[in-house]
Image (spheres, rainbow, N blue to C red):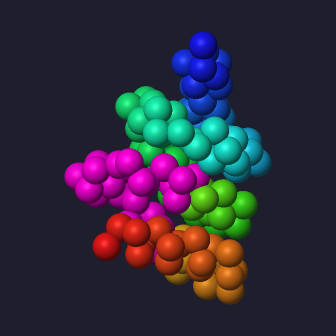
Amino acid sequence: MHIYKADGVDVFLNTLVSYCMDSRLISDAFDLISYLSISRQVRAFIAIQGGLLLITNAMKEHNASLNVSEKGLRALLNLISDIDDRTIEIVGIPAVVSSSISDHLCESSIQEVGISILTILR
């Protein structure tokens, strides 16, 4: 039995829903989603469960939070490799990434990951 089918990724996705106002928990959930999204199966599971939309919505809600933006971008970077272009547009990944870059102009880590995502999406 894989962790993502039992009590792994789904727990962290539920955190994004249940604790959507707590930026500390959101950034921790993003960290764990990034860590767990190493396989194609897990990335597909996250996408099917609405994880991309949950991530982009949380990033919009906490756009001033450096931790949420940085960890959200890292989670998106790990997840986008197997996602089709239509889904990427529907959940608003390019807009959220561009917003994070604009909101944190002096943060090199956000600039680096954000530009990497936009380059991949081209």
Please give the count of numbered marks on the rendered protein: 0
Along the line of sight, the residue nearer the viewer: 63 or 69: 69
Q: What residue is drawn where x is 44% and y is 45%?
A: 52
Q: In terms of secondary structure, what is the magenta stretch mainly?
A: helix
Q: Residue furthest bottom?
A: 106
**Viewer-side residue, 54 vs 112:** 112
Which residue lies at the image location 68% right of the left edge and 75% below the top edge?
Answer: 109
Quarter of the rendering containing residue 121: bottom left
Q: Position of residue 4 (x, y in %)?
A: 58, 25
**Residue 35 lies within the magenta run:** no
Q: Nearer the viewer, residue 49 or 68?
A: 49
Position of residue 23 relative to residue 12, above or below, is below
Above/below status of 93 relative to 33 = below
Q: Is residue 103 visible?
A: no
Q: Is residue 75 above or below residue 29?
A: below
Q: Give the residue drawn at x 54%, y 53%.
A: 78
For the point 38% across and 48% down, the residue is: 82
Q: Tell whether position 93 is magenta.
A: yes
Against 109, is 44 above or below? above
* Quadrant in the picture for the N terminus: top right
**Magenta-colored span:** 75-98
**Residue 92 picture location, percent across and down:** 35, 57
* Percent of width and height locating residue 17: 56, 33
> Which quadrant of the figure contains the C terminus?
bottom left
